Image (cartoon, rainbow, N blue to C red):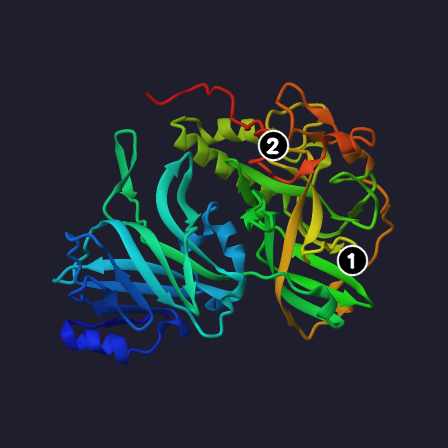
Amino acid sequence: MKMKRVLAGAAALAMCVGAVPAVYSSPAASLCAYAADTALTNGNISISTEDEAFAAASVEVTESWFADNDLPEWTEASNVKPMLSLVQGDNGFTADIDLKDQENADYEYKGDLKITYELPDSWDLSGGVSVCYAFNGKTMFVDTVAYLINDVEISGNTITFTLPYDSLSDVTEGDETDGKVNATRLIIMENSKAADFSALEDGVYDVGLSMFQNVEKRSLSMAANTMYRKAKLIVKDGKYYFNLTFNTGIVMYSPAFCNKIYAMDLSKSTVGDHPVYGVSIPGIVTEYFDDDYVKDFTFDLAKTLYAGMGVDMSDEELRAMVEPTVLQNGIKYIKNVTLDVTDSIQEDNTVQLGFCSDIMDSFYDKGVAGSDNGFNTTNVMLSAPVKTTETAEDVLPAERDLDLTKLEPIFEKCINTCDTNIDSRKIYTKDSFNTYFVPAWSMAEHRTRALAFPPTPKKMRK
């Protein structure tokens, strides 16, 4: 439940400084008076600006906390949701900042605001803090996006940063207006820290999950929004097992599903930075996405994409075009899987996993443009372990007769498009593995993949 307090005048300012309870204990909204030095302050937040024309009289801050499992709907946007995985445990919250005028009406403003936030004493900021700001924009079908604020000063448990605040501008698309930018929203999180596997006794742990393309830089994998940010770690007799759940993700404007996932056996030899063929240990899949759900998800996404491109197609035409591109060759999409990661733990305590994943789908002999069947790896950080009352027997799936020495035959023929273009795809085989292996989703360091844009539609809006 969100609470709101209204404070006004000099007396109210004194209350904000000395008597208002800290609002980080629960979702809250506070209203505090405008000070002469252009600082709007309450118990744990201060907002100021050097803009002499700034004339806001008060500020309302609405906070929603991870621990309460009641984050605002905008955090579910495909470009925002991955950011939530940067958090340590549930040490994070969103804040929506609304400026008010003397009449307590909305004060529309665009400009840089200096934000100083006092964070809970229980947070450990030795590993840093992630601060993101979100705003509405139009990129194809993407309505809400979030960016990290890189320059954040930390002093004890107080952070200071600059927010490019904008409640004034409209979102425009061509000659049309589609609401406000609303660059007024923040996500503030204690940075996740890799759990020390060796320090954990036997048992089942709830853990946080972050998927990084580069761990040191904390740059998220493009596939980060395909994994749920909470998972289970099972420790038993010196071995470590990882149970994870996949979301229906969106990557490069297309539905992204995982059809195979592997733990990388780092005890095997390598050629340079490239694991040798045969180090991929298949996981045990315990649940797949329903086929009809996959078709509906893909259709809904395509419909939104087409609308964003100004394309007018009937539902029947769109379904007829989209559905043949999913679930080809008997492929199923993984929802839950358990992996033995005992030999996949890297020096920084992250886990290296391998993927065979699709953006549009597996094509093999069909050659559907945009399919991303390349074998890639990613670095998964497990953080904030909390021991549960479950036992390993409760969580671990029954063992199956799996060939753990190499990929299944059909995936030996996977197409890797990471370092090639659409006209020159390379076959993933025993002989080509080391030649065409690249880290997962590394857009900055490798050639951009071919996008799966649809063919020219029959009807276009005028």
Q: Position of residue 174 (x, y in %)?
A: 29, 29
Q: Secondary structure at mark 1?
A: loop
Asked whether residue 387 appears in the rendered view, the answer is yes
**Badge number at residue 453:** none
Relative side of 270 to 133, left or right: right
Q: Mark 2: give few (<14), some (14-19) or many (20+) Cα within 10 Å.
A: some
Residue identified by numbered label 1: 342
Judge whether 316 appears above or below 186 on screen. Answer: above
| Residue at 58 percent of width and 29 percent of height | 449
Instruction: List the residue tagged with mark 2.
Output: 446
The quadrant of the picture occupied by the N terminus is: bottom left
Q: Of the two numbered discs 1 and 2 on the same chain, state the one appearing first in sequence.
A: 1
128 sits left or right of 275 in the view = left
The C terminus sits in image quarter: top left
Q: Position of residue 126 (x, y in %)?
A: 52, 65
Residue 280: name its quadrant.
top right
- Give whichever of 458, 368 is nearer the camera: 368
Q: Residue furthest left?
A: 103
Above or below — where is 353 with respect to 131? above
The answer to whether the residue labelled 1 contacts the one labelled 2, judged by CB atoms less than 8 Å apart, is no
**Of 299 and 264, the residue lying toward us:** 264
Say if residue 428 shows up in the picture: no
